[in-house]
Image (spheres, rainbow, N blue to C red):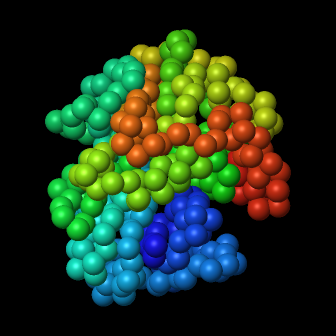
């Protein structure tokens, strides 16, 4: 098949490119000319299409002759204006959908997120299934606009144009330079990550990049009548005690384990203060807050997801277990490329 990958210069998008090429597909990557393309330019057989989700004409060129679109590009930071999040996550997705459908593409695989279902008042939730509804309110603009984009994608499913959304939770693995894991490890290396758990286990689902890629490739070829118009959670087989996992990572990467506990009332008061300060328009648009309701929710709520639907409908099985994934991550972090970027102190 002829495949287009968006977000290819990023973490998951780069792995999607590799996975599609290994599977024997012709692969085209939509990239901005200003992105770091040093690795992509060395990938044999990869075609680069220069463009932007805000440029409809470049999208029409990018999808020409494409059978399957894997859309992983998104604004994923925890700061910015509503207009910025809407433009990148919603409007950009709408333009790409329209271009793909007009070009005769037959499958659109959207990389969504479980964050699309995160509400501000949620507590612990285990083995969440796809029956869980969208919340009435979201934790942040990222969650809200990912939900809007996901609904937009699924609504476009129809004869000859199959759309499906995947919700991988906590993607991790090698070549991640700015995701949640290297950021947390970087803070532990700088001795600046306190234990926010409140002294209780926090059980979470994570998703190794290999497993997210495997799910995307399977969803691209599954029967339309099974997957069309549906979202799916994707995760590793293991459920992880998050703070024990972080302590282990501190040992692997030479960091300070998060043993200094912050009482929940103090933690919550700090979050409120930071959120109030970050309502200042100029600050909120330019800088990521050191703490937010969203980041604290990810670190303190027990949240796990069932992958039974993905297993049933398109044969998803995790291809990389946590132990193998950790070995691969450590090997990459010790390589010249990884040592230069991963787990920099103070990030």
Q: Position of residue 25 (x, y in %)?
A: 53, 71
* Residue 148, placed above or below residue 133: below
**Residue depicted at x 62% and y 54%:** 176
Closest to the observer, 217 or 135: 217
Q: Is residue 277 visible?
A: no
* Residue 54, placed above or below residue 302: below
Q: Is residue 130 left or right of residue 16?
A: left
**Residue depicted at x 24% and y 32%:** 131
Q: Position of residue 344 (x, y in %)?
A: 71, 50
Q: Is residue 337 visible?
A: yes
Q: Quadrant of residue 11?
A: bottom right
Q: Quadrant of residue 221?
A: bottom left
Closest to the observer, 211 or 186: 211
**Residue depicted at x 36% and y 42%:** 313
Q: Position of residue 93 (x, y in %)?
A: 29, 66
**Residue depicted at x 66% and y 57%:** 175
Closest to the observer, 281 or 339: 339
């Amino acid at each position: 098949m002829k495949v287009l990958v968006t977000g290819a210069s990023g973490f998951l998008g780069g792995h999607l490119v590799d996975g599609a090429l290994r599977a024997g597909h012709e692969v085209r990557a939509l990239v901005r000319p200003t992105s770091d393309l040093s690795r992509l330019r060395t990938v044999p057989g990869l075609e680069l299409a220069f463009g932007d989700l805000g440029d409809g004409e470049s999208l029409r060129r990018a999808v020409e002759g494409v059978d399957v679109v894997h859309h992983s590009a998104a604004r994923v930071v925890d700061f910015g204006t509503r207009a910025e999040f809407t433009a990148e996550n919603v409007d950009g997705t709408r333009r790409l959908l329209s271009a793909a459908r007009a070009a005769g593409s037959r499958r659109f695989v959207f990389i969504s997120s479980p964050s699309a279902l995160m509400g501000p008042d949620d507590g612990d939730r285990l083995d969440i299934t796809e029956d869980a509804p969208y919340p009435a309110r979201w934790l942040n603009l990222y969650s809200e606009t990912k939900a809007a984009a996901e609904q937009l994608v699924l609504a476009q499913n129809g004869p000859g144009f199959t759309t499906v959304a995947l919700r991988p939770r906590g993607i991790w693995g090698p070549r991640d330079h700015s995701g949640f894991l290297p950021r947390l490890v970087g803070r532990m290396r700088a001795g600046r990550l306190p234990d926010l758990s409140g002294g209780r286990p926090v059980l979470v689902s994570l998703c190794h990049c290999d497993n997210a890629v495997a799910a995307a490739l399977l969803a691209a070829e599954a029967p339309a009548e099974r997957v069309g118009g549906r979202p799916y959670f994707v995760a590793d087989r293991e459920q992880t005690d998050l703070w024990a996992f972080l302590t282990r990572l501190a040992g692997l990467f030479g960091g300070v384990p998060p043993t200094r506990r912050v009482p929940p009332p103090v933690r919550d008061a700090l979050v409120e203060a930071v959120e109030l300060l970050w309502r200042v328009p100029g600050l909120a648009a330019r800088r990521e807050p050191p703490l937010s309701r969203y980041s604290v929710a990810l670190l303190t709520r027990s949240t796990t997801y069932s992958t039974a639907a993905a297993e049933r409908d398109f044969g998803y099985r995790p291809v990389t277990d946590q132990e193998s994934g950790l070995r691969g991550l450590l090997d990459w972090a010790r390589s010249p490329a990884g040592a230069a970027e991963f787990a920099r102190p103070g990030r």
